[in-house]
Amino acid sequence: MRVIKATYREDRKSFGAFILSEGMRSVTYDVTKDIAAAARANAPRGDEDDGSHHADKYVAIREAGTLKVERNLRVMCKVVNDDPIALMNEFGNINTKRERTLGRTGALFGDFKPEGGPG
Amino acid sequence: MIDLRPFPSIETAIQAYLLERHIPLEDGMIGGDFRYDPDTMPFYVQINRGPGGRTGQLSGTFVVELEVFGREYLETESVASAIEALVLGYPYVVEADGRKVIIDSVFQNAGVSDLPWGDDSVNRFSAGTYVMTMRRH
């Protein structure tokens, strides 16, 4: 019988290029858009609705650089909201309870999603 | 003192870790509730669990948010930066609820930044948002 030895060697350089590729960014961006849409739906809304409500200002940013996880770089996209009311809503202040709209919404996706969650 | 909400093991572990290090913290100056008193405390560190993670009592993955409240802007910022450096210095072993636990990985999602508080006499800094894994030692 002839013994054939496996000679597989992982190609870390190619995998690194793949994980930082535009294709991977597109997949990440799709999830980011889903999170932004969910945040818009989940944000608390008052009675006022003149088309400029802070809840409508959650947007997905495709080109947000990279994130280092341990020693590995990963593509990063972001959900942002530049409305000061969204800041107060997310972090609270002396007079306002912290709602964590974006934090709670983000936790529904990816590795942290509960059983049956979206994403 | 009456705890208004439970203070789970991950927060107890981080509290113990920060108290035993060189940050000039004492009991009462760090906790899970907002107990900052500008008249008696130079600063106060608040430990919060964020949404997300999969956890048991002493093991799992946790999202932790740390905030520092203080009188002096620069001192508050420097305490927040010192906490960030300490927390990122994983792994570490600490005692929580009578058991030794190891925090064996820490990823930072957001770094030190100042946050509005709505009271000009109080400075508020986020000392970072972290994803941590903890297990029994």
Image: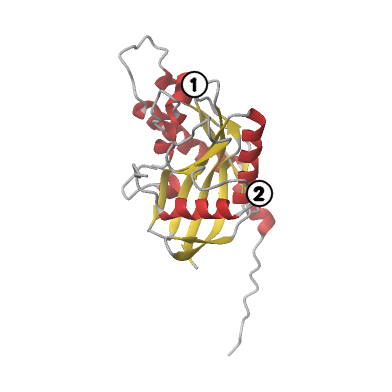
How dense is the environment of label 1, judged by Cα within 10 Å: few (below 14), some, or many (20 and up)?
some
Image vertical order of residue A70 relative to residue B82, above or below: below
Query: Which label lies toward us, 1 or 2?
Result: 1
Q: Quadrant of residue A34?
A: top left
Q: Position of residue B27 (x, y in %)?
A: 51, 48
User: Relative to the observer, which residue lies in front, B69 or A7?
Assistant: B69
- Asked if residue A51 lies left or right of residue B39, the reply is left
Q: Position of residue B13 (x, y in %)?
A: 49, 55
Q: Determine the residue positioned at 35% across, 29% down.
A: A42
The three-letter code of the residue at mark 1 reads Gly
**Label 2 CA crowd tier, 10 Å (few <14, some 14–19, many 20+):** few
> Type of residue at label 2?
Ala
Using the image as rendered, state which of residue A82 and residue A109 is in the foreground. Answer: A82
Q: Which mark is residue A17?
A: 2
Give the labeled residue for mark 1: B118
- Left or right: B60 as drawn, with respect to A19: left
Q: Position of residue A1 (x, y in %)?
A: 58, 90
